Amino acid sequence: MSKSMAMKQKALDLKQKLRHPFADPPRAHKPIRVLQESEIRFARVNDRFYNTYNGMVVATIKCVVVGDGAVGKTCLLISYTTNKFPSEYVPTVFDNYAVTVMIGDEPYTLGLFDTAGQEDYDRLRPLSYPQTDVFLVCFSVTSPASFENVREKWFPEVHHHCPGVPCLIVGTQTDLRDDPSVREKLAKQKMQPVRKEDGERMAKELGAVKYVECSALTQYKLKDVFDEAIVAALEPPPKKSSKKCVIL
């Protein structure tokens, strides 16, 4: 095969891969691991660049993270993608991160989109939603108000713009759930930290794929959150077609 024919075939294979990246989705039981940057290469096909791993084009999973401000969304993403907990809090407007993961023997780029939870950005935030494969709807287990906003604000917003796209509810900051000062502060307001069973109940009531919780500081079950997001994106519930968010 000539070099030009080989390039044409490579381009056709690439287009097919990008058009149907989840045609043969990996099973949930396959191991998921994050690849190091040194393992990723770039390929140029028809003047466009793509991530590759061992010669394979890497399909992309888009995951958008939403929730009230200051519940730990950015810390969640930074801790997962860099293995480091950020030293200071800087309110997010919009930001994005990416890691490449191996699911069994298939590489995928997990694109992670951080969003601002403040009301000032309610009109801009949905600009991050098109082509989303899965949402992480976050709240802090130390903030009952942020938990209630999952029901009152975040699920309605996500389902309005992206009906049918799978959502996980994520409880953050679990390392603070039993912190004496946190419990004392909440007790003065006649409140208590959100329990795991409360999150599980809400996930069932709202039709979320699952409830998961973690600590970005200690990384307790941090990887599980993103593993579950990947599985939800690639393996939608039975009898429901895979959908992506499209905003017209």
Image: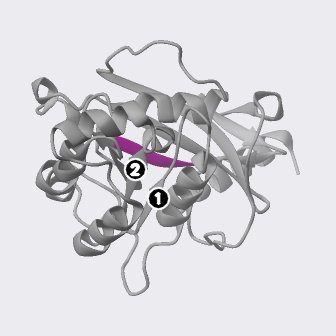
Q: CA distance from mark 2 to mark 1?
A: 6 Å
Q: How many marks?
A: 2
Q: Are marks 2 and 1 in contact (CB under 8 Å)?
A: yes
Task: Residue 122: say if magenta.
Answer: no
- Residue 26, quarter of the rendered image: bottom right
Q: Is residue 5 above or below residue 204?
A: above
The residue that appears at 61% across and 57% down in the rendered structure is: 17
- Give the residue type at disc 1: Val
Residue at the image position 33 percent from the left and 21 percent from the top: 92
Which mark, by number, is residue 78?
none
Q: Secondary structure at mark 2?
A: strand
- Residue denoted by label 1: 212
First reached walking from the N terminus: tag 2 or tag 1: 2
Residue 80 picture location, percent across and down: 60, 36
Q: Is residue 223 visible?
A: yes
Q: Is residue 46 visible in this depiction of the protein?
A: no
Question: Taking 241 as reference, is 104 left or right?
Answer: right
Q: Is residue 209 left or right of residue 175?
A: left
For image coordinates 17% across by 28% down, the residue present is 118
Give the amino acid type for the residue marked by disc 2 in the picture. Answer: Gly
The coloring applied to the image is one colour
Q: Bin the neighbour count of mark 1 within 10 Å (Cα to Cα): few under 14, some 14-19, many 20 and up.
A: many
> Residue 60: x, y in percent?
55, 47
Report which residue position mark 2 lands on: 171
At x 51% / y 34%, what residue is drawn?
A: 77
Where residue 156 sits, quadrant-wise, is bottom left
Magenta part, dominant SS: strand
> What are the residue bounds of the magenta stretch?
60-65
Residue in the foreground of this view, choosing between 237 and 48:
237
